[in-house]
Image: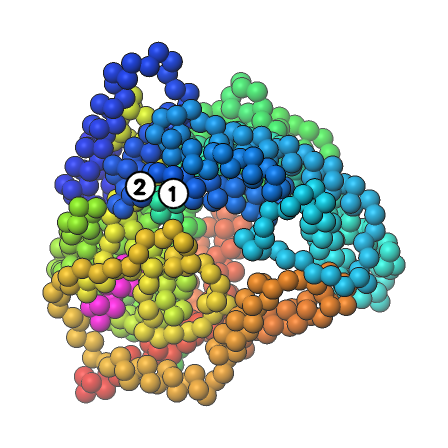
Amino acid sequence: MSNLLKSLGSVKRLPVVLILFSLALFLTLSSLGTGKKDPPGRYEDVLHRVAKMLQDGHYQPQSIDDAFSKKIFRKYLQELDPEKAFLIKEDVEALNRYSTQIDNELLGDPVRFFLFAGQSFNERMEEAAILSKEILKTPFNFDLQENILLDGEKMNWSADENERKDRWRKKLKFQVLERFYDLVESRERNRKQPDFVIKSDSELEIEAREKVRRQLDRTFDRYRNKFSADDQFNLFVNTITNTMDPHTEFFPPIDKRYFDEEMSGRFYGIGASLQYDDGNIKITSVVTGSPAYKSGEIQAGDIILKVAQGADEAVDLTGYLVPDAVKLIRGKLGSEVRLTLRKPDGSNKVVTLIRDEIVQDESFARSAIVEKNGQRIGYIFLPEFYADFERPDGNRCYIDVAKEIVKLKEQKIDGLVMDLRNNGGGSLYDVVQMVGLFIEEGPVVQVKDREGRPTVLRDKDKNILYNGPLTVMVNEFSASASEIFAAAIQDYRRGVVIGSTSTYGKGTVQRNVGLDPENGYFMSSSELGTLKLTLQKFYRVNGGSTQLRGVSSDIVLPDNLEDLKIREKDNEDALAWDEIGKVLIQPWVTGYDLNSIQQTHQARMRANSRFQTIRDNATWLSQVREQDYPLDYTRYKELQQRIQQTVKQNDQLSKLSETLQVRSLPGDLERWNNDKPKQDRFKIWLKLLEQDVYLYETLQVMDDMIRLKNTASK
């Protein structure tokens, strides 16, 4: 039961426990006395258990029937071949006999669809590998005017082999054209440089084709080595779970471990930073004091060729990306991992290491002081609402933020900025506690289960850690717990929310449930895998859900992401918005009028077209992404030059001409005296803050808040 409470983390309440208990009891009983002589295979076992959990535990389950099956059929083929580059119409028609059978597979029939789809994909992939090499043997004609559509969702499956071949010709021509253009631009920039070799257009075209050939070889190696039947099955199961809603996910055991590590900020590994470099996994830095550092045999620049677990056979990393390699290199505390390295001098070396705890402290809350107009404004950056449930002394974000506030108060700050931009959420428990740092006791968020029973999560601590002016920075990627925080601050009128028109719009609550009954359904991990299951929705204290609509900013600052279809509302499988009854709260007495602040901000915007230009440019760029691309050099060059000019203009507009005065808190920079790469990254972070135009306007709003508050107090 203690493990259950850890997995619940943020919602330690009886309704959730009962849901999980009844679900576990149902699944356990349903697995007994079936009378089958031949037990199902692992694929059938996983799929059947996932289906039961979806039906009996999901907040708003869809019926597992032929209609659901057809939806999975369409989505899985799209996930398997998103650019419609491999399969052709004939393959899809042959597979269509399974379009109404997937629901039966979920309910216990033998698993066949994804296996046959994978077989078709693998065969067509190998054909495409041969086809692409043939196409790349011949120079491309960049004078011929033709276009290419890059959005696979807007395409139909190729009618036959001829159409597929023509698609690959255009696809490869576009990739070569991209590189050819870059090479020509580099030639023009550097032609006057001493010792620079000026190549002809035909030589550059050959070089561009060779670059594409090498990139394709790596791509096809990845399909062969890192897209096995197990990988395809995991994709299939996630297609099913994501169709229930975008945040219900299936984790194989290794992926679940990786998820927990990212959530806690701690893992057991070797202490080396990795980078994907031209098909290789390269070590870029080594953490001081880590196993890699202590070995004395691993340096930046080493290429990891193979990874082995203890005495087991080594896994070749050909075709692997960094996250794939990381999952192999990390493991249990005290376990052995063997790396086969290619050293910078070309020699190979096998290094054996014992994994130890590595703390990703760069992902924790951090703060700085910004001085403007004679005022000291505290700034806290929180990348996620992290929580280490496995360790009593593990990092919790609300505790870390509280520590940063104490340090900032010691610097006698006049206001505080909480930056939740790109914060995708995390622990619900921690966000409730964090809101409590800024308000007296009271409701923070409402949570409703599938039975319609709302529960109010409250801050029960009457103490307020910080009672001064507060702003919250958000953008389109501020999601889940970030939205709860911003909504509560807004509903209490405790501070001003600043950023994009609205946040992401994720208003659902998930819990991890293991699939393995032998280890108990209350375990958040199991040998069969784990289901991150949507069990509840959360609502603001005013009764409205943040689902789909997100949180609307009090002060809107347009950015480059506004027109991209990246929010929850852009996903066809997202749950709907709704509302429930509001909860009575006692609003904060701010000392300033929000309408006055908004009017002052709008006056600044009318006098400075910076943000409107950023928005107009972003709109144009989003439109370009949706249109066909030219495949002749002249039109491609014109388009690229305009794109580059527009992107450059937005980059310039997003940076201040006169930098802000930003400084670290005493002792912060010295934390990483023994780890220069971390220290350098911290300095870069401070430099970026100095140029951040969005932070600058947030400080302008903060100045208005302080001025109005001082006027009111007089």
- The quadrant the N terminus occupies is top left
Residue 136 position within the rendered picture, expressed as x and y whole percent measured from the top left? 78, 45
Which element carries disc 2, helix, strand or loop?
Answer: loop
User: Badges 2 and 1: C-beta atoms under 8 Å apart?
Assistant: yes
- What is the three-letter code of the residue carrying label 1? Ala
* Residue 43 location (% of width, % of height): 43, 26
Picture mark count: 2
Q: Which residue is mark 2?
A: 63
Nearer the observer: mark 2 or 1; the answer is: 1
Report x, y in % for residue 240.
40, 40
Residue 219 higher or lower than 453, as above or below: above
* Nearer to the camera, 588 or 558: 558
Q: Which is more toward the observer, 374 or 212?
A: 212
Q: Is residue 91 above or below residue 41?
A: below
Q: Is residue 539 magenta?
A: no
For the residues labelled 2 and 1, the Cα–Cα distance comes to 8 Å
Looking at the rendered image, the quarter that the C terminus falls into is bottom left
Circle 1 is placed at which residue position? 67
Residues in magenta, as a range: 483-493
- Three-letter code, disc 2: Ser
The x, y position of residue 601, in whole percent, is: 37, 82
Instruction: Identify the residue at image location x=71%, y=70%.
Output: 638
As drawn, is 434 to the left or to the right of 222?
left
Report the front residue among 550 and 304: 550
Query: Relative to 316, is 80 above or below?
Result: below
What kind of secondary structure does the magenta stretch mostly adopt? helix
